[in-house]
Amino acid sequence: MQLDERDYARQALTLDELRELFAGADPRDYLNPKSPAFKARGLRGKTLTPEDALRLMAEEPNLLKRPLTIVGRTIVAGFDRDRLREILK
């Protein structure tokens, strides 16, 4: 198994990278509503399109749930140990 690690607080994902990453998934599911950045932008209760979510993540990487673990086309956000064990089998 190969691990590629990226600190997206230091090297933010571009809008194109985010579009590719979340192709076939709803990027709104990967926004972190508990982050200070989410609260600071007044996003609670707002209706965002998937494209809105992608643009926001590109502007402010701290809006992404962390960590993102990607195995093939499966993405796990946060520390979901059971889900991580399942995809890493």
Image (tube, helix red, strand yellow):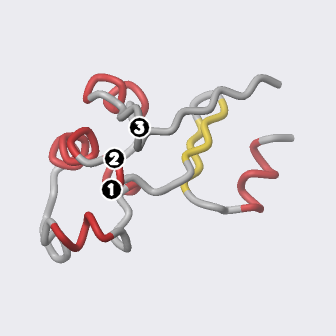
Amino acid type of the residue that numbered disc 3 sits on in the rendered structure: Arg
Q: Which residue is mark 3?
A: 10
Q: Which residue is mark 2?
A: 61
| Residue at the image point whose x is 16% and y is 50% from the top | 49
**Could you tell me which secondary element the residue under label 1 belongs to?**
helix
Residue 5 percent coordinates (x, y): 62, 32
Q: Which residue is mark 1?
A: 63
Going from N to C along the chain, the mark reached first, 2 or 3, is: 3
Amino acid type of the residue that numbered disc 2 sits on in the rendered structure: Pro
User: In the rendered view, does 67 fall on the left or right side of 80?
Assistant: left
Residue 38 percent coordinates (x, y): 25, 66
| Residue at the image point whose x is 83% and y is 25% from the top | 1
Residue 51 percent coordinates (x, y): 18, 41
- Neighbours of disc 1 within 10 Å: few (<14), some (14-19), many (20+): many
| Residue at the image point whose x is 35% and y is 58% from the top | 31
Image position of 72 with respect to 48: above or below: above
Q: How far is the residue under mark 1 from the one under mark 2?
A: 5 Å
Q: How far is the residue under mark 3 from the one under mark 1?
A: 14 Å
Tags 2 and 3 touching, CB below 8 Å? no
| Residue at the image point whose x is 80% and y is 41% from the top | 88
Q: Nearer the viewer, residue 8 or 73?
A: 8
**Could you tell me which secondary element the residue under label 2 belongs to?**
helix
Image position of 30 with respect to 88: above or below: below
**Could you tell me which secondary element the residue under label 3 belongs to?**
loop
| Mark toward the viewer: 3 or 1 | 3
Residue 37 percent coordinates (x, y): 26, 64
Q: How far is the residue under mark 2 from the one under mark 3?
A: 9 Å
Tags 1 and 2 touching, CB below 8 Å? yes
Image position of 87 with respect to 11: above or below: below
